[in-house]
Amino acid sequence: MATTLDKSQYDIRDLSLAPEGQRRIDWAALNMPVLLQLRDRFRQERPLEGIRVSACLHVTTETANLMLTLKDGGADVVLCASNPLSTQDEVAAALVAHDIPVHAVKAEDNDRYYSHIIAAIEHRPDITMDDGADVVSTMHQRFGELLSHVKGGTEETTTGVIRLRNMARSGKLAYPVISVNDARTKHFFDNRYGTGQSTLDGITRATNILWAGSRVVICGYGWCGRGVARRAQGLGSRVIVTEVDPTVALEAVMDGYEVMPLNKAAPLGDVFITVTGNIDVIDRQHFAVMKNGAILANSGHFDVEINLQALRDMATNVTEVRPMVDEYLMSDGRKIYLLAQGRLVNLAAAEGHPASVMDMSFANQALSAEYLNAHGEGLTPKVYAVPAVIDEEVGRLKLQAMGIEIDSLTEAQIAYLASWEAGT
């Protein structure tokens, strides 16, 4: 397969979209002060000089700022999409204008999606950067001869971390990967506040529904589910949570939400939102009892949380009634509306997380890549947490950029917390 940069393969049409993409990238950068500080340092220190990075991330304005930071740090970067519907073509064009190859086109089919992943792998990366672990898993399955060359990788999302930990448990993971998703400055903010706001933004843009008074069913109460539930409640929705973990379900109850099995929630909901990372969460038996006009949306990484095949089998007709809205006519005359083909609604129907949230996530990505370049060869093949010093530095820089000061422990307080003897 070709690995050279043939700009025509990106459907960019003589880069005419690049100026608009650059304007949008610059706008996002206004709300990414932490990453911009790192970019200034990277430009001076060049900590990734000569390092090949293959990134599989959503091709958005925020990702573009990360790619430019890596490039300024000396990295030879290639980017492909981590979702067929999340690519912003004008952003891809702008990055190509910066001589960063981008293997992504919005709404590409499955075959083309994976051909783009293979193109990124054929870059022969020293460091991989994933959002869903598609590059890592494809490389392990089909390009084993390249694995020994990789120093390490990073992973952005919960779904990808689950896949990677399964690989590590089975002894298949060939190089160390840092779970950026588990950084406190990532999942506390990106997953909760970013997913919460952007998911409702995507559904609103696609449907223009009124949230106040609607019954919204949130499937899964992890960090993403918490954020979606809080935002829906804040807009006046009556929120129902479905869960499989008893402790997490108890937390949802004490946070003020109704909690019940999905079988009981299915006839009640106006809007259903999946954020679990698992398959067939909403299934045939749920479609059978949903009310006329029910809306289905997914904010989990892959399009497997809603059983799309079962929905198609049960429908007598499917019609696109609005962009990103497909109407499924059921045999009894009910209509069920699926958003964004069951893919990530916040990226397919909107713009994804706000830049100020992705600022922290991508600062963790850049610093983790720097860490892997310096220390990756001494790490064993497993999934690692982001080093605490990196996590804390990102939080410190974010507060500094916001003009917020916090207290520090005195020497006496530090000594007290480190003591154990009675009376000290």
Image (cartoon, helix red, strand yellow):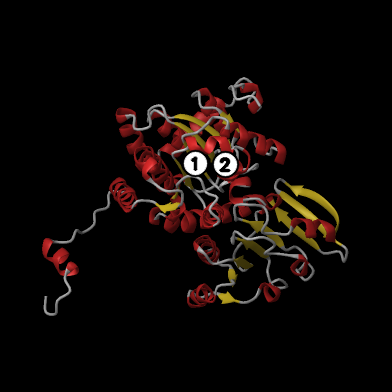
Which numbered disc flags the more N-terminal residue, 2 or 1? Answer: 1
From the top left corner, tell me how far across and down residue 46 is, in percent: 34, 29
Q: Quadrant of residue 411?
A: bottom left
Q: Nearer the viewer, residue 222 or 279?
A: 279
Number of numbered markers? 2
Residue 90 visible, this orientation: no
Going 48% across and 77% down the picture, which residue do you hit?
A: 254
Kind of residue at disc 1:
Met
Q: Is residue 386 above or below residue 238?
A: above
Q: Say what secondary structure mark 2 lies in.
A: helix
Task: Give the CA separation, mark 2 to mark 1.
Answer: 8 Å
Circle number at residue 241: none
Q: Nearer the viewer, residue 8 or 385?
A: 385
Q: Nearer the viewer, residue 102 or 28?
A: 102
| 69 left or right, relative to 396 | right
Question: Residue lying furthest bottom in this view?
Answer: 422
* Circle 2/circle 1 CB separation < 8 Å: yes
From the top left corner, tell me how far across and down residue 95 is, in percent: 52, 28
| 208 left or right, relative to 65 | right
Q: Say what secondary structure mark 1 lies in.
A: strand
Q: Quadrant of residue 332?
A: bottom right
The local crowd at label 2, few if under 14, some if 14 to 19, many if 20 or more residues have their Cα within 10 Å, is many
Write down the residue under mark 2. Answer: 135
Q: Quadrant of residue 408?
A: bottom left
From the top left corner, tell me how far across and down residue 355 is, in percent: 45, 44
Q: Quadrant of the N terminus?
A: top right
From the top left corner, tell me how far across and down residue 125 is, in percent: 50, 33
The local crowd at label 1, few if under 14, some if 14 to 19, many if 20 or more residues have their Cα within 10 Å, is many
Q: Quadrant of the C terminus?
A: bottom left
Residue 97 visible, this orientation: yes
Kind of residue at disc 2:
Val
Write down the residue under mark 1. Answer: 129
